[in-house]
Image: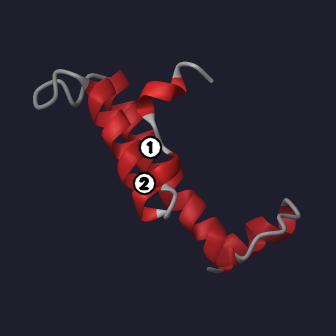
Amino acid sequence: MTQLTALRREYQVELPVEALAIMVRCWVRLYGVISMDALGHLAFALPDGDAFFERELQHLAAVLGIGEFYAADQLAVR
């Protein structure tokens, strides 16, 4: 947590370190899926990377307790 404490101080983030940890975990997870799909590393197992990414978003929303606010079909409208 010391790295996140330093990050919090450097950028003057007004969030608890625990919230930053959750943000970094979610960001890394989504960034990883995007990178793996963009580089073609998921193609051997997943012909539709977009669907997998949407499922990851749904899962993260559920884990964060905001699953009821996630609606993939409404994302294009916003």
Q: Residue furthest bottom?
A: 2
Left or right side of 65 for 11: right
Query: Residue 65, percent across and down?
Result: 49, 64
Tell me: residue 60, above or below residue 7: above
Q: Give the mark nearest the N terminus, 2 or 1.
A: 1
Observer-nearest of 75 and 39: 75
Query: Residue 66, percent across and down?
Result: 52, 57
Q: Residue furthest left?
A: 44
Is label 2 in contact with label 1 (beta carbons under 8 Å)? yes
Q: Which residue is mark 1?
A: 30
Left or right side of 29 for 16: right
Label 1: how many Cα within 10 Å (few below 14, some 14–19, many 20+): some
| Among the 4 quarters of the image, the one containing residue 8 | bottom right
Q: Amino acid at mark 1?
A: Leu
Tell me: residue 54, above or below residue 10: above
Q: Which residue is mark 2?
A: 60
Observer-nearest of 48 and 25: 48
Query: Residue 43, percent across and down?
Result: 17, 24
Residue drawn at (77%, 70%) of the image:
15
Q: Which mark is residue 16?
A: none
Q: CA distance from mark 2 to mark 1?
A: 9 Å
- Numbered disc 2: secondary structure: helix
Residue drawn at (49%, 63%) of the image:
64
Camera-side mark, 2 or 1: 2
Q: Amino acid at mark 2?
A: Leu
Label 2: how many Cα within 10 Å (few below 14, some 14–19, many 20+): some
- Numbered disc 1: secondary structure: helix
